[in-house]
Amino acid sequence: MGNPSITIDAARVDNVTGHKNMLQLIQLRWIAVAGQFFTIGVVHFGFDIPLPIETMLAVLAALAVFNIASMVRWRSPKEVTNRRLFVALLVDVATLTAQLYLSGGASNPFIFLYLLQVNLGAVLLTPRATWTLVGISIACFGGLALYGRPLPLPLDQAGGLSSPYVQGMLICFALDVALLVIFITRIGGNLRERDARLASLRQRAAEEEHVVRMGLLASGAAHELGTPLATLAVILGDWRRMSPFMADRELLQELVEMQAQVQRCKTIVSGILLSAGEARGESSVKTTVCTFLDELVGEWRSTRPVRWFTYDNRFHEDLPMVSDSAVKQMVCNVLDNALEASPNWCSLEAMRKGGSLVITVTDTGPGFAPEMLGQFGKPYQSSKGRPGGGLGLFLSVNVARTIGGTVSAHNRTVGGAVVTISLPLAAFTLEEKKTYGR
């Protein structure tokens, strides 16, 4: 991914998933602590099978201390890497090996709990780390077969469920199956959620790259249009002073309208160049949020064939900001879509909600089709049926997302649509930026 912010977001998603998976291992370890404590008590006191109970409880206490330390570390913002997950599983394997060594070695029916650790490693770790864990588990099994302390546990498997060994194997099997299903399902859900979020980030990177390409094309076109527009302005100015136009009132009025439209085109071209970062030092103006909104709406109304428009600015704070052409164009795009869908009436309402400026644009048009709402803000999603349709909303969504805001839409029950723009004030107001940066 070329966008640094997208790369950082992807790394953050991986880290969040790593923390969730580490939490699953911590929860499993607490189950192991409780299960081992219960099993040691039942075997030693219930079946009267002698166990080195002090040593086994000491191993269990060490595992509990390690788990508490893991919980403290899990709450820190440190990255949960493949190495840390491997070490955590290695500690579980080592603890299981110590307990089996003290309670029968390879003849202990709970020897098959190694499979639980290996399966978790296959899901969580890289192939190299997984095979390393497999090799260590096999080595531990072999070591227990050679050096494990045998217990006076009858291996009479012909006795069926009455045999303590068969009972132990049944409990081990049930534990393996239950814990595998529970924790593999949870970890798999974490990994699927991570993949979905990464896919969303890749889609966002592709869309932003599309916006960049469009911006480069628009900037190049703006440069090319500058000269012919200037030429047209000079020619129209000369025509206006010619006697045929001065004598004909109707022609003169049309000429004035042509000059106004050429001037509007020049303003649009200047805005494109400004958004591209050219002449920004000359054109940036310090203003306030309230004034910025008033001027934006005033300019939009004067350059569009608006029949009836309701404007309700409830943002009464004098927060200083630098006039942002990208935000201005974004709001105008949404207003243009509302006006096209509802030529007779549309409205804009602005207010503050917490640390955000919320702008709501409402119209009485046909509303959005369900499939368009499902793909809202995607390029070329439009009901207008013309090439390039839907790019206005696409650009608006991406401009808002670039500064940490959102654009959402829904249909009104009485007809028409509502588009809501939410922008964090810290992203473009001077006072909020100072507060945000402390």
Image (cartoon, rainbow, N blue to C red):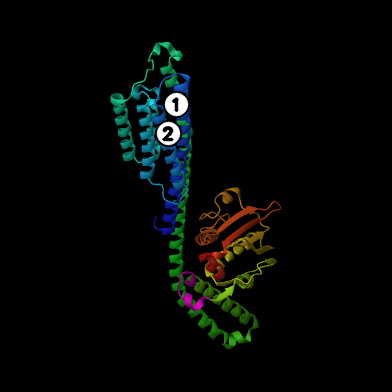
Determine crowd level at label 1: few under 14, some 14-19, many 20+ residues with C-alpha closer than 10 A.
Answer: many
Q: Is residue 9 above or below residue 428?
A: above
Residue placed at 31% from the left, 30% from the top? 138
Q: Element type at marker 1?
A: helix
| Amino acid type at mark 1 | Ile
318 magenta-colored: no
Residue placed at 44% from the left, 38% from the top? 64
Point out residue 43 in the picture as x, y percentages from the top left corner: 45, 22
| Amino acid type at mark 2 | Leu
Please state which of residues 152 and 128 is positioned toward the viewer in this rendering: 152
Q: Is residue 393 above or below residue 35?
A: below
Query: In which quadrant of the rendered view does residue 338 lie?
Result: bottom right
**What residue did someone put label 2 on?**
60
What span is colored magenta in the figure? 273-284
Please state which of residues 72 and 318 is positioned toward the viewer in this rendering: 72
Q: Which mark is residue 436?
A: none
Q: Element type at marker 2?
A: helix
Classify the position of the N terminus by image quarter. bottom left
Query: In which quadrant of the rendered view does residue 48 lie?
Result: top left
Determine crowd level at label 2: few under 14, some 14-19, many 20+ residues with C-alpha closer than 10 A.
Answer: many
Q: Which mark is residue 40?
A: 1
Point out residue 423 in the picture as x, y percentages from the top left corner: 57, 62
Q: Is 420 on the left or on the right of 1, as rendered?
A: right
